[in-house]
């Protein structure tokens, strides 16, 4: 009788232990309200997928990996998007949750955004003006940086050499622990773009002239875990771009050029609760564009400065989700066309 009890105990003991291991932890997770808009289609690329892409800019990524139409004016030149028939001004571009497109033009040159500037990229198609504000009629392109608190240190360097003077170099350095993370990126790309092209089949090929492009980016991200639940993040992005504007098909030569300078800062605070999330963001963006054309005696600098503050509260009650937010945006711009005036806007 004792042997039967012993065999019965040994037979059911492993299954009891196995059932305890399987039912270890259950995680219930809900997406943000802005990511659940009705009638939208979402495409996303994470860090590992972006590293395998045969692209160097956001414009090339969207052109190769999505059905978004990218109007590209050549290597290193202006690139804009059109989503579901909308214009470039109908696509809202976000960097860590805040819009970065120019308030003077209402759009952003996607050729100036390197692919390595974000850890994950999300393209949300469809009208989202009610959730994101104006400029999101066609869709939302979100560039996000995120921390990996499991890394202690990491160094990564990549180089790429191509035809027509193309050269790219990037260096990433990450260091931290389970409560603090620092990530630094240095990105450089350049190209001569002296390729040959034909205007018509019966004409000789023409070599592209005055089309050099050069860009440098410095990105710095800090992440802190404050207490057990709160997280504080600081994002910094400094960008320098220089490009020559080639002649059109009806011009013999061109000496036009454009210099772009951009400084972007974001301070992000998050505090999850049992029922939802508190999120506060403060951003400062400053961009300078300097267009020069000595042949036409044109020297036209312009710049804008934007300061943003945003507070959001999300929570869930029974089967309902609620989202309340407030945003303040201050913008001022300077250009020769404003005849000495400095337009300012508070929204």
Image (cartoon, helix red, strand yellow):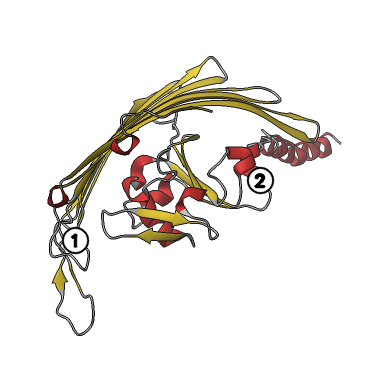
Judged from the image, the secondary structure of the residue bearing numbered disc 2 is: loop
Residue at x 17%, y 62% (from the top left corner): 163
Which class describes the residues within 10 Å of circle 1: few (<14), some (14-19), or many (20+)? some
**Does residue 193 sit above or below 343 in this rendering?**
below
**Which residue has dot 2 on it?**
37
| Quadrant where the image shows the N terminus | top right
**Does residue 74 sit above or below 102 in this rendering?**
below
Which of 137 and 232 lies nearest the eye of the viewer?
A: 137
| Quadrant where the image shows the C terminus | top right
- In the image, is 2 to the left or to the right of 148? right
- In the image, is 332 to the left or to the right of 136? left
Which of 166 and 147 lies nearest the eye of the viewer?
A: 166
- In the image, is 152 to the left or to the right of 267? left
**Does residue 207 sit above or below 262 in this rendering?**
below
Residue at x 36%, y 54% (from the top left corner): 79
Q: Residue 206's image quarter? A: bottom left
Which of 156 and 37 lies nearest the eye of the viewer?
A: 37
Residue 55 in sight: yes
Q: Which mark is residue 84?
A: none
Cα–Cα span, label 1 and label 2: 44 Å
**Which residue has dot 1 on it?**
247
Judged from the image, the secondary structure of the residue bearing numbered disc 1 is: loop
Residue at x 53%, y 60% (from the top left corner): 85
């Amino acid at each position: 009788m004792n042997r039967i009890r012993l065999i019965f105990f040994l037979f059911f003991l492993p299954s009891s232990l196995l059932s305890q291991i399987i039912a270890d932890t259950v995680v219930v997770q809900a997406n943000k309200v802005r990511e659940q808009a009705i009638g939208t289609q979402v495409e996303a690329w994470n860090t590992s997928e972006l590293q395998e892409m045969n692209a160097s800019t956001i414009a090339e990524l969207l052109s190769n990996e999505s059905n978004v139409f990218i109007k590209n004016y050549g290597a290193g030149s202006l690139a804009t998007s059109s989503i579901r028939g909308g214009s470039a001004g109908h696509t809202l571009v976000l960097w860590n949750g805040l819009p970065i497109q120019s308030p003077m033009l209402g759009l952003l040159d996607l050729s100036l955004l390197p692919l390595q500037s974000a850890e994950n990229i999300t393209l949300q198609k469809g009208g989202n003006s009610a959730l994101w504000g104006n400029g999101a009629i066609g869709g939302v392109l979100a560039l996000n940086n995120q921390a990996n608190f499991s890394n202690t240190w990491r160094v990564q360097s990549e180089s790429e050499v191509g035809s027509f003077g193309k050269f790219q170099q990037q260096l990433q350095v990450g260091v931290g622990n389970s409560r603090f993370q620092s990530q630094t990126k240095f990105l450089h790309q350049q190209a001569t773009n002296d390729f040959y092209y034909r205007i018509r089949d019966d004409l000789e090929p023409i070599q592209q002239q005055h089309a050099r492009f050069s860009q440098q980016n410095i990105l710095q991200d800090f992440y802190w875990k404050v207490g057990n639940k709160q997280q504080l993040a600081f994002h910094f992005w400094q960008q320098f771009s220089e490009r020559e504007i080639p002649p059109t098909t009806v011009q013999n030569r061109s000496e036009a050029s454009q210099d772009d300078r951009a400084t972007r800062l974001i301070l992000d605070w998050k505090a999850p609760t049992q029922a939802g999330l508190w999120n506060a963001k403060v951003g400062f963006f400053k961009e300078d564009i300097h267009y020069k054309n000595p042949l036409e005696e044109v020297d036209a600098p312009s710049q804008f400065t934007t300061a943003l503050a945003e507070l959001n509260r999300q929570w869930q009650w029974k089967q309902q989700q609620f989202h309340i937010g407030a945003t303040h945006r201050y913008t001022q711009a300077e250009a020769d066309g404003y005849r000495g005036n400095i337009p300012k806007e508070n929204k």
